[in-house]
Amino acid sequence: METSTTELGWFRAELFRSIVAPRTFARELAREHFGLAGVLVALIAGMALSISVDALVLATKGMSPAGFVARLVIDAFLLGVRIAIAATVVATVVWGGLRLLRREEITLDQSFTAIAFALSPLVIAPIAAVLVTLDPSLLVVAGVVFGLVAVRALLGILLNVGAILPRPLAAIALVLIVISGWFSMQDQISRVRFTAYAIAPQLAPALAAAPARGKTYQLEGATLAAPNDWEFSVRGVPGEIAHLEIASATLNIVRGRPDPLATLDSLATTLARSERLGFSARRDERSVVLLGGHLTVDDRADGAYEGRHIALRQFTVAEDSAGLALQFRFFDPPDVEAAFAQAAAIAATLRIVGREAQLSTTEISRTAPALMR
């Protein structure tokens, strides 16, 4: 029992030192052997990261994390395990890359420890979650706290790697860490990015398009204008609130209510899935813009469907806890950029009326198929 207490005390002391005295900790990396302590740090850091991001996502939607405790704990454990595995993969890539260069300055254990303990500042990231739980108006403050913790973790990687390797090799190791980390944690990086946009939407540029002129249509929860040659209809398709078309293009206006912990990018991907069945893209781009003051994912794709040239553009707009998408499909466009510009001009006329109307539309979409039967 005494040994266990001593080991636990040593672990707490080293974890605390890696957070508050990163330079001192980094200088002693080459002389210490941390073993499984690094795995535990990576696991705890991953769990703390998950809880923080999930709490911020919920806060941006006006939801309290208190109602999702079980979900947050399960997701935290899963991400913690994944972070530990990712840290192992990155450490192995760094160590293996240096060995290929016939340099054996560090061991695999040192490589893993340097990366794992660099993540230790994430342990205090849940402070951001506590802030938004106590007072939702502190969302921006919580976002700043989370950002500072993330920057501190990056600084820890710089210090730890620089302490165990000469500068030229440290630079190579850092490149390997960035590349490996990007591929292994790309989805989490995207979640953090879109959470930052949700907290500070002014970071996104406004959609650069002049609004189209034509007839304005009153949709449940929104208004949209389109040139007079576009024909309007309501087809009763579940989730679709309106449909417009001309001979060479169609526009579906759909709504979606994502998982509470989903960010806008995952909603855009989900809503685009049905439009892309059988579609093969040779060009696929995504950007984030402000459309009518609303955070929007702008997807552009050019490719083929059953041998026919098709161009797709989708605007997915954030509306509190729900979302709306404008799905444009152009058939055999002679000028893809002109087609995309036409879609942007129509999208620029979109105006969201309000959340109450939005909820009413959701209920209409759910009951329409039953009424048709």
Image (spheres, rainbow, N blue to C red):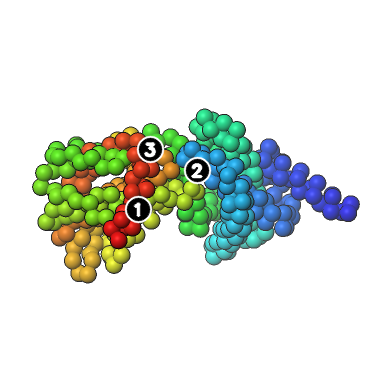
Question: Label 1, on which residue?
Answer: 367
Q: Point out residue 23 in the picture as x, y percentages from the top left corner.
A: 66, 40
Callout in the foreground (3, 2): 3
Above or below, comparing residue 345 to residue 176 in the picture: above
Quadrant placement of the C terminus: bottom left
Q: Residue at x 23, y 40 (%)?
A: 218
Quick one: 49 or 370, which is closer to the camera? Answer: 370
Amino acid under disc 3 = Arg
**233 displayed left or right of 371:** left
- Can see residue 350? no
- Say which element carries label 2: helix
Q: Point out residue 221 in the picture as x, y percentages from the top left corner.
A: 31, 40
Question: Label 3, on which residue?
Answer: 355
Marks 3 and 2, Cα distance to the nearest angstrom? 18 Å
Marks 1 and 2, Cα distance to the nearest angstrom? 29 Å
Amino acid under disc 2 = Val
